[in-house]
Image (cartoon, helix red, strand yellow):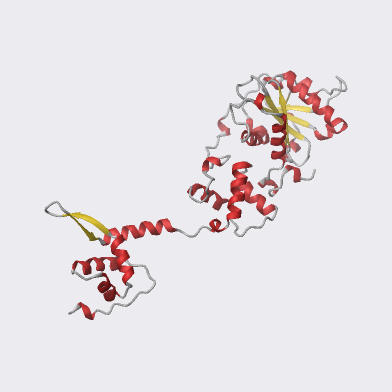
């Protein structure tokens, strides 16, 4: 039977199948030109020409010379690779304003991807496109969506190893003050304002040079950061003295309790609790967490990570100006938090 009488059904606007690629290979070996193959198969001439060019391979002859031939297997493999890489169109690629906004927030303002998306929704900011947190992470992971933003710019990388707190041993030695075990249980529910956690953020060398005294309020996640000349009991008490003078009569209402770890700088519980007004008057009640139990001051630990976005480990805090510290404090208190529906500490009502 003559091949000229073949009336294969035309599949317009359809990708070539693997079977059709094998047919192209057979027809070309019979000596047919691309336009003749196209007529036989009911395809466009340019479709056949592109497919032949895509699937060409270099073969060696018996005399060690080379020739080029169309190979259906090669054409199919390239087609499948291109199909995998194609994927759906990127919505964010059409919205340059949104791209610029996200890059600025993460790179310059040190926001997390979740905080960026949450703030957009909470403030009802309008852009041409709308994406979710997971999609934004996926775009950043691709590495070819943003011009300036990469995974290296993320403040916290995903997929970190979680610590197994159940395996941590606790000790009650050298606990002179009041243990966290005696702290009223209602403080744990975080409903009442005025219960704080306190810690030190060190700089270039442990215990050497300037450090930051940080106080984190448990209900609103409000932050107070104070630069101290050193990590000593004397500096801690002096910093709280300044706070008491600053807030005056409002101090006792603002600072009801403070929870600290067992660091040497916090061991003077009498000096921390004592008011500057009188040695017999308490300004605040102090509680000590268990040794090696940082999760008992989880608010402190999480907010310290925010501070490290600006002051990484090893930085000399002596060189950090008071204006910079105030900026970091205001930034933290203005940072949108998922737990509050992406409102900030400044946006919460006492």
Task: Count the marks.
Answer: 0
Looking at the rendering, which quadrant does residue 283 occupy? top right
Residue at 19%, 69% (x, y): give it.
31
Vertical position of residue 79 compared to residue 119: above or below: below
Q: Nearer the viewer, residue 257 or 1?
A: 1
x and y percent of residue 208 in the render? 64, 19
Vertical position of residue 133 compared to residue 224: above or below: below
The reply to whether residue 154 is visible in this rendering is: yes
x and y percent of residue 339 in the render? 68, 46
Vertical position of residue 76 compared to residue 312: above or below: below
The reply to whether residue 290 is visible in this rendering is: no
Looking at the rendering, which quadrant does residue 299 occupy? top right
Vertical position of residue 272 compared to residue 325: above or below: above
Q: Is residue 316 left or right of residue 61?
A: right
Q: Nearer the viewer, residue 80 or 44?
A: 44
Q: Is residue 254 left or right of residue 223?
A: right
Q: Is residue 50 left or right of residue 177?
A: left
x and y percent of residue 145 in the render? 51, 51
Q: Nearer the viewer, residue 120 or 50?
A: 50
Q: Residue furthest bottom?
A: 5
x and y percent of residue 276 in the render? 85, 22
Residue at 55%, 31% (x, y): give it.
167
Q: Residue furthest left?
A: 63
Q: Quadrant of the N terminus?
A: bottom left
Residue at 77%, 22% (x, y): give it.
237
Q: Quadrant of the C terminus?
A: top right
């Amino acid at each position: 039977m003559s091949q000229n009488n073949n009336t294969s059904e035309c599949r317009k606007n359809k990708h070539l199948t693997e079977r059709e690629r094998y047919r192209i290979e057979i027809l070309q070996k019979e000596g047919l030109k691309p336009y003749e193959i196209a007529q036989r198969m009911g395809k466009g001439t340019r479709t056949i020409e592109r497919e032949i060019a895509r699937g060409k391979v270099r073969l060696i002859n018996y005399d060690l010379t080379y020739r080029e031939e169309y190979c259906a297997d090669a054409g199919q493999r390239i087609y499948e690779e291109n199909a995998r890489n194609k994927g759906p169109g990127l919505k964010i690629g059409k919205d340059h304003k949104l791209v610029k906004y996200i890059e600025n927030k993460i790179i310059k303002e040190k926001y997390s991807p979740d905080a960026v998306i949450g703030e957009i929704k909470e403030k009802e900011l309008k852009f041409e496109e709308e994406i979710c947190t997971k999609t934004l992470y996926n775009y950043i992971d691709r590495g070819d969506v943003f011009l300036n933003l990469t995974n290296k710019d993320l403040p916290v990388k995903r997929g970190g190893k979680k610590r197994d707190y159940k395996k941590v041993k606790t000790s009650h030695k050298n606990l002179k003050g009041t243990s966290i075990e005696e702290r009223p249980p209602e403080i744990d529910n975080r409903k009442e304002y005025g219960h704080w956690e306190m810690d030190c953020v060190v700089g270039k060398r442990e215990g050497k040079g300037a450090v930051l005294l940080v106080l984190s309020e448990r209900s609103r996640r409000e932050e107070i950061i104070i630069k101290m000349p050193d990590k000593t009991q004397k500096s801690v008490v002096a910093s709280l003295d300044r706070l008491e003078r600053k807030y005056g009569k409002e101090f006792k209402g603002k600072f009801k309790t403070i929870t600290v770890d067992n660091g040497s700088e916090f061991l003077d519980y009498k000096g921390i609790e004592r008011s500057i007004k009188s040695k017999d008057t308490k300004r605040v009640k102090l509680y000590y967490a268990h040794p090696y139990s940082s999760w008992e001051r989880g608010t402190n630990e999480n907010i310290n990570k925010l501070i490290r976005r600006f002051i990484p480990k090893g930085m000399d805090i002596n060189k950090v100006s008071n204006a910079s510290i105030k900026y970091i404090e205001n930034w933290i208190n203005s940072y949108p938090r998922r737990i509050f529906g992406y409102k900030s500490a400044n946006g919460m009502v006492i």
